[in-house]
Amino acid sequence: MNHGPFHQLDPERNYFPATAHHIHLMGICGTGMGAMAGLLKKAGYRITGSDNQVYPPMSDYLAAAGIIVQNGYDPENLTPPPDLVVVGNVIRRDNTEALELARLALPYVSFPQALAHKFLSNKKSLVVAGTHGKTTTASLLATMLAGAGYDPGFMIGGIVQAFQANFRLGGGDYFVVEGDEYDTAFFDKGPKFLHYQPQIAILTSVEFDHADIYADFQAVQDAFARLVAIMPADGVLVACFDDQVVRKLAAAAPCRVVSYGRDHAAAWSFAEMRSSEGQTSFTLLRQGRPSGRFTGIMAGRHNVLNSLAVLAVLDEIGVPAEVMARELAAFQGVRRRQEVRGVVAGVTVIDDFAHHPTAVHETLQALREAYAGQRLVAVFEPRTNSSRRTIFQEQYARAFSGADEVVVKEPEPLPGVAPEEHFSADRLADDLQGQGIRAAGFTNTQQILAYLGDTLRSGDVVAILSNGGFDNIHQRLLDILQSR
């Protein structure tokens, strides 16, 4: 297909003008782009934006911030011409507004470029990367840094409870970034984290994901290898040595590597983990030797590992151990990560972002420990490109072993993907029933709500797992429980 003038897009226009005042964001209602709009607004720029998905809560947030958003993409959205356009990765090269951007020959950057140029270039960048745990770990790092008095900026893919926001300008030396491996923009197919100039980086794990942009697991590993390769010689890579791929990648790091993991041979590890009454405590081991008792609200071994990574970074920065212990205990969590949305009629409803099989398994095991003796019902919406394919079909059958009952929504088929390559909720339910786990697939959310309303009883814990809104199932379920 010929997209006309877009093929003459000038790479020399790909820069952030020093004299920019009016900045327009294409795809402004995405989580990251909305946060970027907020950061740029706080930095003193006039901000406008456009999107074809303009609805609450992001539309309400942008309106409250005084940011004008156009519903739909249109060449007229670039009249009068802004000084700079930030192009979100939701934008395709044949987007009508993108074609007008090319015709006008305006300066343009991607979201990661804007973040790097305006907010990271004069800071010490702390990047949290990996297939799992990025949002929780980055939120914990930013919150603990703030509590320790360092006034960090941050850009994170979830709402940090301490700030009720996913971004902060900050006035200190450090800026915390969730380092996403997803592609940057249609004109830059490299992973976003390559723009983030890490001084200290955390690498939590490397597994296959994002089947829409990575052909195979080797391509994923190559992307993370590029992140490791850009570490500065005086930087620090904090790496989870439980993951053999991470260990292999860390061996090629051009900087110092600090290891953490379950294995006591790691520089940072733990022992005597205990979970009870919404708290998890553990003994910190440094070089295999006890170094104090730490307590936090996040359940599960995976969250203890996330805590270890953050403690290692704070130690590099020079935060005293007693301050680290105080701030870990004070951490309030992240929205949509083991977030208790309510307890009604004795039923606890929990919202969690888990969708990859490993994340599902770790989350359910953590909840099993935290709510020992209670019936655990998992409600799962496969929504990502990878989870809606057969890629993880067999892994999901093992991932839900921690649940007493599993309810699965049949996902919408992926366009252009052969039917035999689609994930099947009914097949997963059959596989789980073969393991003695009660399970059922449903075609829509209303059916799931009706079923839960009839079967839940006092003492049950419902873990709702999805990376999307899931048709507001959490509040709707609480309302049903309240009306029974």
Image (tube, rainbow, N blue to C red):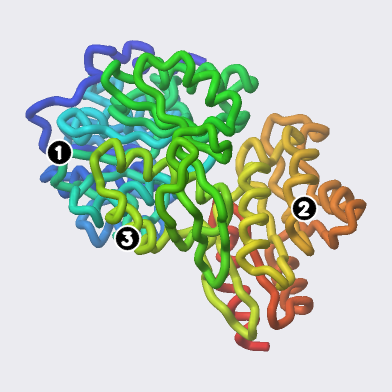
The circle on residue 22 is 1
Q: Note whether 214 is above or below 48 in the view shown.
A: above
Local SS, label 3: helix
Residue at image position (9%, 27%) is: 18
The answer to which of marks 1 and 2 sits earlier in the sequence is 1
Q: Quadrant of residue 316?
A: top left
CA gap, disc 2 and disc 3: 35 Å
Q: Is residue 11 left or right of residue 307?
A: left
State the residue at coordinates (38%, 12%).
Answer: 7
Q: Residues within 10 Å of mark 1 (few under 14, many from 20)?
A: some
Q: Nearer the viewer, mark 2 or mark 3?
A: 3
Q: Which kind of residue does numbered mark 2 sit on?
A: Ser
Q: What crowding class fits label 3: few (fewer than 14 Cα within 10 Å), some (14-19), or many (20 or more)?
A: some
Question: Horizontal placement of 391 versus 251: left or right?
Answer: right
For mark 2, what is the residue? 401
Residues 224 and 284: in front is: 284
Residue 253 placement: quadrant: top left
Instruction: Return the x and y of residue 39 as percentages of the image width and height.
Output: 22, 45
- Residue 242 position within the rendered picture, expressed as x and y whole percent measured from the top left: 58, 33
Q: Work out whether 339 lies above or below 154.
A: below
Residue type pointed to by label 1 = His
Residue under pointer 3: 326
Q: Nearer the viewer, residue 277 or 75?
A: 277
Q: Tell me the quadrant of the picture where the C terminus can be found.
A: bottom right
The image position of residue 5, as x and y in percent, is: 34, 15
Query: SS at mark 1?
Result: strand
Q: Earlier in the sequence, mark 3 or mark 1?
A: 1
Q: Given contact means CB atoms under 8 Å apart, are the residues at marks 2 and 3 in contact?
A: no
Q: Quadrant of residue 132?
A: top right
Does any portion of residue 293 appear in the rendered image? yes
Image position of 394 with respect to 53: above or below: above
Element under label 2? loop
